[in-house]
C-alpha cells in the first residue's frame, strides 16, 4: 500500500511539473478581429499557461500583453510586436480608424507599452514595431522548449 501511495504521489508531482511548464508559442501572428483575440487570450489567461512570443505578434495579437499577466509572458530574441490603431472598413472599401476601439485597445496595454507607444506618436494607421533591446527591457527572456505549442 505504501508503494502504491508513493508511486501515486510521484505521478501527481510530475503531472504538476509538466502542467506548470506548459506554454503557448506565438509566432507570425498578424492579428485580426479584436473580439476574437480578446476571447482567445481570456481563455489563455484562465488556463494559467505561459506565453512565449517568438516572432511577429502584430495588431490584435498584441492584446496578449494586457490579457495575460506580465509574469506569464516571455520574449525570445525573435519577438517583434506590431502596434497600430484599430480600424473598420469604410465607404469604398477604405480603412477608417475606429477611435473608440483604438482607445480601448490602448487602455489594455501595460503602462510601459503605453509609454513606448505614446513616445512614437500614439496608435495611428501606421504600424510601429517593438523588438530587440527595448522589448527585452520590458519582458523577461525565454528560451524555446519542446513543450511550447503553436496557436
Image: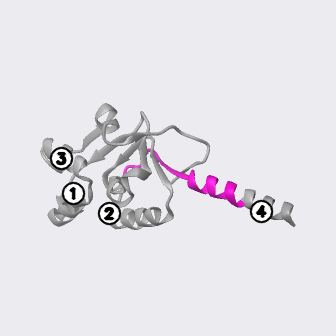
Distance, label 3 to label 2, CA atoms, is: 21 Å
The residue pinned by badge 2 equals 34
List x then y, in percent, for residue 133: 31, 31
List x then y, in percent, for residue 96: 17, 60
Comparing 91 with 51, the one in front is 51
- Please state which of the two labelled residues, at mark 3 or mark 4, is closer to the viewer: 4
Name which residue lies at 17% across and 64% down.
91
- Please state which of the two labelled residues, at mark 4 or mark 1, is closer to the viewer: 4
Residues in magenta, as a range: 12-31
Which one is earlier in the sequence, the residue at label 4 or at label 1? 4
Tag 2, which secondary structure?
helix
- Please state which of the two labelled residues, at mark 2 or mark 4, is closer to the viewer: 4
Name which residue lies at 39% across and 58% down.
68
The residue pinned by badge 1 equals 106
Name which residue lies at 38% across and 57% down.
69
Neighbours of disc 1 within 10 Å: few (<14), some (14-19), many (20+): many
Which one is earlier in the sequence, the residue at label 1 or at label 2? 2
The residue pinned by badge 3 equals 115
Q: Which circle marks residue 8 in the picture? A: 4
Tag 1, which secondary structure?
helix
Amino acid at each position: 500500500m505504501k508503494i502504491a501511495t508513493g508511486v501515486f504521489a510521484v505521478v501527481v508531482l510530475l503531472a504538476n511539473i509538466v502542467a506548470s511548464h506548459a506554454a503557448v508559442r506565438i509566432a507570425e501572428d498578424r492579428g485580426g478581429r479584436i473580439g476574437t483575440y480578446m476571447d482567445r487570450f481570456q481563455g489563455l489567461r484562465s488556463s494559467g499557461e505561459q506565453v512565449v512570443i517568438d516572432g511577429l505578434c502584430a495588431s490584435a495579437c498584441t492584446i496578449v500583453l494586457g490579457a495575460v499577466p506580465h509574469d506569464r509572458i516571455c520574449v525570445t530574441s525573435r519577438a517583434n510586436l506590431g502596434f497600430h490603431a484599430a480600424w473598420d472598413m469604410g465607404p469604398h472599401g477604405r480603412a477608417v480608424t475606429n477611435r473608440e476601439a483604438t482607445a480601448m485597445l490602448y487602455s489594455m496595454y501595460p503602462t510601459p507599452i503605453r509609454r513606448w507607444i505614446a513616445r512614437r506618436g500614439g496608435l495611428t494607421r501606421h504600424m510601429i514595431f517593438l523588438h530587440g533591446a527595448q522589448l527585452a527591457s520590458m519582458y523577461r527572456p525565454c528560451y524555446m522548449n519542446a513543450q511550447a505549442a503553436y496557436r
